[in-house]
Image (spheres, rainbow, N blue to C red):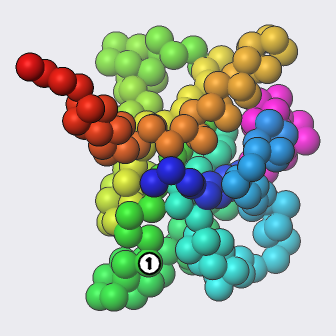
């Protein structure tokens, strides 16, 4: 896959007061082949349009779930979105293969420093461990779960660090080679052109 369409689902209850998620959202708005969809902006006071959301998913190759980490998970609207959009018979279960082969990226802003997310740290568990429900959900619907993007110290990070984070975020979520299968295919192709004699 040399051309990829990415859908960024921004899930922040108050994006205007956000420092990191707001900058991330602004940074990807001008990216080619990236669609930014703010769930709280669209669904704060109205029901989720399931058909629209499913069509958005079908039209993209990589889905990025961007949110601040709340109580070791996502804001509540994202859970509701999963419940309503990842329907039985469409996303999973008999005939539920519409998301098979699509890519999943989780992007989180996190208040505490990184060292607090480990065994023996203040929060005891790593972000990889805490995102297991997202990994399991991706597996259930046949999506490929790719490495997450996380920015720690969201409450104390400097404006300069936020700007740098936004640049890294864009590079991360738009990098085709984030998928290890793509990286491996490209590596093997390079090996074919190498004379090993």
| Residue 125 in view | yes
Kindly state the secondary structure of the residue where label 1 is placed: loop
In the rendering, at what x and y percent does residue 33 appear?
A: 70, 54
Quadrant location of the C terminus? Answer: top left
Quadrant location of the N terminus? Answer: bottom left
Residue 180 is left or right of residue 163, and the answer is: left
* Residue occupied by mark 1: 98
Please name the residue shown 61% across and 58% down the image. 5
In the rendering, at what x and y percent does residue 82 appear?
A: 54, 67
Give the main secondary structure of the magenta stretch: helix
Instruction: Determine whether 57 is above or below 38 in the image.
Output: below
In the rendering, at what x and y percent does residue 168 appear?
A: 64, 25
The quadrant where residue 71 appears: top right
Please name the residue shown 57% across and 14% down the image. 113
- In the rendered image, the residue lying farthest to the left is 197
Task: Reply yes or no: does residue 22 show up in magenta.
Answer: yes
Q: Nearer the viewer, residue 15 or 37?
A: 37
Residue stretch in magenta: 12-25
Q: Nearer the viewer, residue 194 or 129?
A: 194
Please name the residue shown 37% across and 78% down the image. 97
């Amino acid at each position: 896959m040399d051309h990829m369409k990415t859908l960024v689902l921004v899930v922040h209850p108050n994006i205007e007061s956000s420092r990191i998620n707001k900058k991330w959202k602004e940074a990807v708005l001008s990216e080619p082949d990236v669609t930014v969809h703010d769930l709280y902006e669209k669904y704060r006071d109205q029901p989720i349009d399931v058909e629209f959301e499913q069509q958005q998913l079908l039209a993209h190759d990589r889905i990025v779930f961007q949110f601040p980490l709340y109580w070791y998970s996502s804001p509540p609207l994202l859970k509701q979105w999963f419940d309503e959009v990842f329907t039985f018979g469409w996303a999973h279960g008999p005939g539920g293969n519409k998301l098979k082969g699509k890519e999943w990226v989780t992007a989180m802003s996190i208040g505490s420093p990184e060292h607090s997310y480990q065994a023996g740290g203040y929060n005891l568990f790593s972000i990889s461990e805490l995102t297991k429900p997202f990994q399991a959900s991706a597996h259930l619907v046949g999506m490929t779960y790719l490495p997450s993007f996380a920015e720690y110290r969201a409450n104390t990070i400097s404006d300069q660090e936020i700007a740098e984070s936004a640049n890294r975020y864009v590079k991360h979520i738009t990098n085709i080679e984030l998928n290890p299968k793509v990286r491996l295919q490209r590596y093997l192709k390079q090996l074919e052109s190498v004379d090993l004699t």
